[in-house]
Image (cartoon, rainbow, N blue to C red):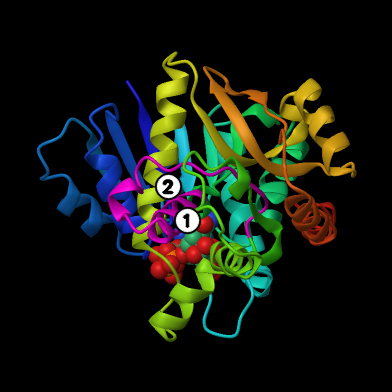
Amino acid sequence: MVKAVVLGAAGGIGQPLSLLLKTNPSITELSLYDIVNTPGVAADLSHIDTPAKVAGYLPPDDGLKKALTGADIVIIPAGVPRKPGMTRDDLFKINAGIVRDLAKGIAEAAPKAFVLVISNPVNSTVPIVAEVFKKAGVFDPKKIFGVTTLDVVRASTFVSEVLGDLSLAPKVTVPVVGGHSGVTIVPLLSQSSHPLPSGFSQENLDKLVNRIQFGGDEVVKAKDGAGSATLSMAYAGADFAYKIICAAKGEKGIVAPTYVNLAADKEGGDALKKEIGRDLEYFSAPVELGTEGVAKINTLGKITAHEANLIKAAVPELATNIEKGVSFIESSKL
Ligand SMILES: NC(=O)C1=CN([C@@H]2O[C@H](COP(=O)(O)OP(=O)(O)OC[C@H]3O[C@@H](n4cnc5c(N)ncnc54)[C@H](O)[C@@H]3O)[C@@H](O)[C@H]2O)C=CC1
Ligand SMILES: O=C([O-])CC(=O)C(=O)O
């Protein structure tokens, strides 16, 4: 029995994500919460002939609490998306408060659930969830994840395009580490399961790295004011949620990059901090998932001098983003 909850379920990501979760036969209960429209989305999805029992909730009558009670996994795509010209950090003003209040609800109604944060800016919203949980006395660093899977999905796709064969995309794996915004997104292309063509120039490598780092902007620009990535994000979010569920059920050897509190695995986290040369509290690293969430944080391993420079460039911005999330909760009345 697995109960999955989507907070922000009526939105651009929320709806297709809920659809994909409904088609996942290992989910037996699917609970949809938003400030609008969830009864309709839930009624629609409930006609699909898969096992999950679907229910929609709105804020009145303790809707958040009802949606969350008994949750095994909570996925949060609630909040506003970017428009052209905005950075993810520009979303902090609105999304920080939304994520804080939802985290408070989770800490009260489902403190043991796995929490997957999609809402941007992820580099700051994950610390926000963690700080709310700390204040509530229910913090378990193994169970809170920033979803960076879309960066991994993009890297697989763009590398397979470079290789001239999109049919390779599902098999190409590239660890993408750091965080989830601009230069904090660091693809370790030297560790790609499918190496880049021999003679691939530095100029082309720079272009490829830049495309992975700013893939979100590519979509924001193409949507021209109508929001940011929703369908590819729903795919990525459902994929990561499925990995968490499989690992929770005891499947071994599932490793995925995700943005976590490095205290989740002290030994691995400390080794990673040494590698990156800074005592960051959060970082997206390849994480081995287990029955309790984070089982092991892997280090970056062998990287090139160019990749080391990308990490160096990512670290100060990450530190600022983390601090911003932490101090937001320090100064919030909960
Ligand atoms: N982690 C990642 O890789 C990605 C993250 N995102 C982020 O995901 C978030 C959502 O994006 P979209 O779905 O495109 O936006 P959207 O505006 O289409 O949907 C957001 C939904 O959140 C709901 N919402 C607002 N306040 C809420 C509250 N207090 N409680 C519950 N629901 C609430 C809205 O009613 C709306 O249905 C944005 O912050 C966006 O930047 C988007 C793409 C990728
Ligand atoms: O770019 C955005 O604002 C949405 C996002 O995080 C992404 O697509 O990676």
Observer-nearest of 54 and 15: 15
Quadrant occupied by the N terminus: top left
Observer-nearest of 203 and 325: 203
Give the percent coordinates (x, y) of residue 146: 59, 46
In-image side of 296 versus 277 (left or right): left
**Vertically, is 15 above or below 20?**
below
Query: Residue at coordinates 18% horizontally, 49% vertically from top-left?
Result: 45
Which residue lies under the disc numbered 2?
237
- Which corner quadrant of the image does residue 284 belong to? top right
- Mark 1 CB lies closer than 8 A to ligand 1: yes
Circle 2 Cα neighbour tier, 10 Å, few/some/many (<14 / 14–19 / ≥20): many
Magenta stretch: includes residue 296: no
Q: Is residue 72 visible?
A: no
**Vertically, is 183 above or below 189?**
below
In-image side of 126 versus 256 (left or right): right
Determine whether label 1 and label 2 are within 8 Å by CB.
yes
Which residue lies under the disc numbered 1?
77
Query: Residue at coordinates 71% horizontally, 36% vertically from top-left?
Result: 300
Q: Secondary structure at mark 1?
A: loop
Q: Which residues are magenta?
A: 152-180
**Vertically, is 245 above or below 152?**
above
Give the percent coordinates (x, y) of residue 8: 43, 57
Task: Give the amino acid type for the residue marked by disc 2 in the picture.
Answer: Gly
Observer-nearest of 64 and 178: 178
Residue 303 tag number: none
Disc nearer the start of the sequence (1/2):
1
Give the percent coordinates (x, y) of residue 329: 78, 53
Query: Residue at coordinates 37% horizontally, 40% vertically from top-left?
Result: 171
Observer-nearest of 123 and 200: 200
Give the percent coordinates (x, y) of residue 229: 42, 66
Task: Give the amino acid type for the residue marked by disc 1 in the picture.
Answer: Pro
In-image side of 208 versus 43 (left or right): right
